[in-house]
Image (cartoon, rainbow, N blue to C red):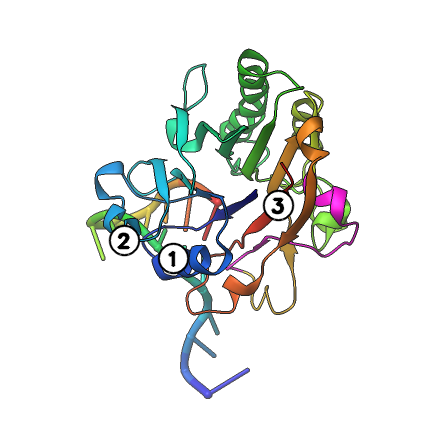
Amino acid sequence: MKIASFNVNSIRARLPIVLNWLKKHQPDVLCLQETKVQDADFPKDDFVQSGYEFVFKGQKSYNGVAIFSKDKIRNVRYGLDSQPSDEPRLICAKIGKINVVNTYIPQGFEPQSDKFQYKLDWFERLLNFFKNNFKPTDLLVWVGDFNIAPEPRDLYDPQNLLGSVCYHPDVQKALKKVMDFGFVDVFRKHCDESGQYTFWDYRLPNAFKRNLGWRLDHIMATFPLAEKSAACYIDKEPRSVEKPSDHTPIVAEFKL
DNA sequence: ATGGTCGGCAACCGA
C-alpha cells in the first residue's frame, strides 16, 4: 500500500504534473492539498482515464483537498466535526483496511494575529476529531500540509526562523498534543537526515537550488500502522519540471 | 543583467 501527499498549489495549474506523477508512481492513494478550485470547476474529466477514483472539496481561490485512490473510497467525510468545519481543509475516508485523514492545516499568517490563534485552535479541534472518531489502535494515517516544521533539522535556518508561524514553540506544542493521540512520524522512522524538505518558498531566490526549504508535509500513522511501514521518502523529481509547485510529494509504503 | 514568486482572478489576498 503506497500512500502519498502533495500540496499542488492549484490542481489546474499542476494538471500535467499530477497526471504524470500518478502514472509513474502508481500510488494506491494520493492526497492533495491547495487544489484552489470550487467543486463545480474541479477538472474531473482529466482524471477519468487515470484509473483512479477521487473525492474532493474546494472553494473559490483558496484551500481545497482531494483524495485519489485505486481502491474504492468509502465513508467519506469533509471537515472537522466542530464549527467552523473548514470542509476545504479536511477529507476523511476509509480505503481498504486503512482510515485516511487528509488535512490542509491553516498557515497562520503571523504569530500576533487571529489567524495564528485559529491555527493553534485547529490542531486542538483536530485532536478532538481523532478522539471522537478513532482509537489509537486503529489503522489510521494522517497526511497533508501541516504548515509546521517539527524540529530544527526540518528547516534550513532554525536559529533565525524560530518564532515564525511554521516553526513556532506554540505550534510545536499543538502538534505534539495531536501526536500524543498515538501517531508516529513515518518519515522520521525511516530517515534521520537533516535537510530533507518538502517545501521551498517561491519568494526566496533560488530556494530549491540552494535547498533553503522546510519539511511541512507529513505522513503520520498510528503505531499499529507505522509498524507496517516499509519505506518513506520525499520525491523531489516534480520540482525539476516546468512550473513546479512550491511543495513536492512525500510517499510512504506499508506492508499490509 | 536594466530583472527580482506564484495562483487565482480581476484588485489584491494568501502562501
Q: Give residue A21's position: percent from left, percent from top.
A: 46, 58
Write the residue at 58% across / 61% down: A236
Tell me the chain of label 3: A
Determine the image quadrant of residue A212. bottom right
Distance between the alpha carbons at the discs numbered 3 and 1? 19 Å
> Dot 1, crowdedness within 10 Å: few (<14), some or many (≥20)?
some
Could you tell me which secondary element the residue under label 3 belongs to?
strand
Residues marked 2 and 3 touching at CB (< 8 Å): no
Determine which of the numbered discs, if any, sits on residue A46 in the image.
2
Q: Position of residue A15 (x, y in %)?
A: 35, 57
Label 3 environment density (alpha carbons within 10 Å; few <14, some 14–19, many ≥20)? many
Q: Main secondary structure of the magenta part?
A: loop
Q: Classify mark 2: residues with Cα within 10 Å, few (<14), some (14-19) or many (20+).
A: few
Circles 1 and 2 in contact, beta carbons < 8 Å: yes
Residue drawn at x 51%, y 59% as measured from the top left: A203
Q: Which residues are magenta?
A: A186-203
Q: Amino acid at mark 3?
A: Ala
Q: Chain of mark 1?
A: A
> What residue is pinned by disc 3?
A252
Q: Amino acid at mark 2?
A: Asp
The x, y position of residue A230, in whole percent, is 70, 45
**Spatial separation of the CA atoms under disc 2 and disc 3:** 25 Å
Circle 1 is placed at which residue position?
Answer: A19
